[in-house]
Image: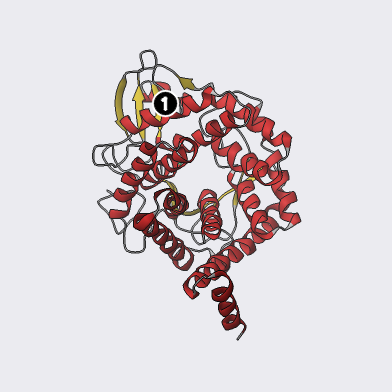
Amino acid sequence: MKKILATAFCIATLGCSPAHENSVAETETCLDYCAAQTERTLAQIASAGYGMSPRNIAPGDSTWNLCPVSKELWTEGFWPGVLWYDYEYTGNVEIREAAEKYTEALGFLSEIPAYDHDLGFIIFCSYGNGYRLTGNPEYREVILAAADRLASLYNPAAGTILSWPREMENLGGHNTIMDNMLNLEMLFWAAENGGRPEYAEIARSHADTTMKYNFRPDSTSYHVAVYDSSTGRHIRSCTHQGYSDDSMWARGQAWGIYGYTMCYRFTKDDKYRDFACKITDKYLSMLPDDLVPYWDFNDPEIPNVSRDASAAAVVASALVELSGYVGGEKGAAYLDTAKKMLRSLYENYRGGDSCPSFLVHSTGHRPAGTEIDYSIIYADYYFIEALLRLKSSL
Ligand code: GLY
């Protein structure tokens, strides 16, 4: 009866439909689930201290593996990011206090030279969300300092950021990976919030060059592009975490979809939105029925290989945003697909009672044999982000 009355109220006063009300209720069910899992994780890891970051859970296990925060651990911003998103949803001050503590344990990384491009993931998921929600001026300073560190990896000859300084010799020069697209967000943001204005130009140059050399004519992506460090000449494009040099690594394509959507947010340049649509359409055209990709679209062992729930979460989050930029029937179809992806993740890929992560079945680095079919913290981060984006779009 209560539900019927609520629906009648919704239709009479706001003009929204029962389908809309169902979407809101479904999204909140998922967010309530995330809130409960967040509290379980917090209880499980609290005694280890704020310098230990939850990274993954092995298949069938129920305990987070923790890693000490360090410049070499690219994933430590995601847990504080999850806490900030959970605080945004619940308003729970204990969660906010934990978010602050885990965030502040990472501040030292803005005071030392950038180890690699991942500084953007680390600082913007933690301090970026913290600043967005609290306006704490000290957080802004950390982000701006980290943007300076990240920008120091830019090579004007190549027109991109050096993603992995440690791989220069191994790969044969300046290298830029698809994942690096996400870290342009911190540069665009810094340029608009008191950092050096040229960071926006660096980010645009990086995005344009990546568009040229990290994608094939059929809109599938290469993980890595290698350039001559002195002249900037493109040498080759290849994979690192994918099946082969000419395959489409699922999370690589996901990073691209998210990255170009975000570039449009900051620049309003149609070329980024149109490119995001092109690579999204390619990705969507190749998905299995449940909308969660196998770890690489071209692994010949499909369907007997691991999925990557993290890629699905990244794309769902990007699609909610992209749907708002595209509008019309195509935009509505993107939003509908994002909802279906989130439903599929919640129904078939959730940790549930047996495991405190939001999601299971992600693949970290299959060629290296690591984190295959694991729960991984970044899958959870993009899942809750997607749900919050969806909630505010409804
Ligand atoms: N940024 C590394 C990965 O996506 O696995």
Q: Quarter-wise, where is residue 33 in the image?
A: bottom right
For label 1, the SS is helix
| Residue drawn 43% across the image and 65% down it | 344
- Residue in the foreground of this view, choosing between 111 and 257: 257
Residue 110: % across, % down: 64, 29
Picture mark count? 1
Q: Is residue 114 visible?
A: no
Q: Is residue 228 above or below residue 263?
A: above
Say whether residue 351 is left or right of residue 220.
right
Q: Residues within 10 Å of mark 1 (few under 14, many from 20)?
A: some
- Residue in the foreground of this view, choosing between 303 and 276: 276
Residue 303: % across, % down: 29, 59
Q: Quarter-wise, where is residue 388 in the image?
A: bottom right
Say whether residue 159 is left or right of residue 4.
left
From this viewpoint, which residue is outermost toward the top?
Answer: 230
Q: Is residue 241 above or below residue 206?
A: below
Residue 354: % across, % down: 56, 67
Q: Is residue 209 above or below residue 16?
A: above
| Residue drawn 56% across the image and 28% down it | 191
Render colour scheme: secondary structure
Residue 304: % across, % down: 31, 58
Residue type at mark 1 is: Ser
Residue at which label 1 appears: 205
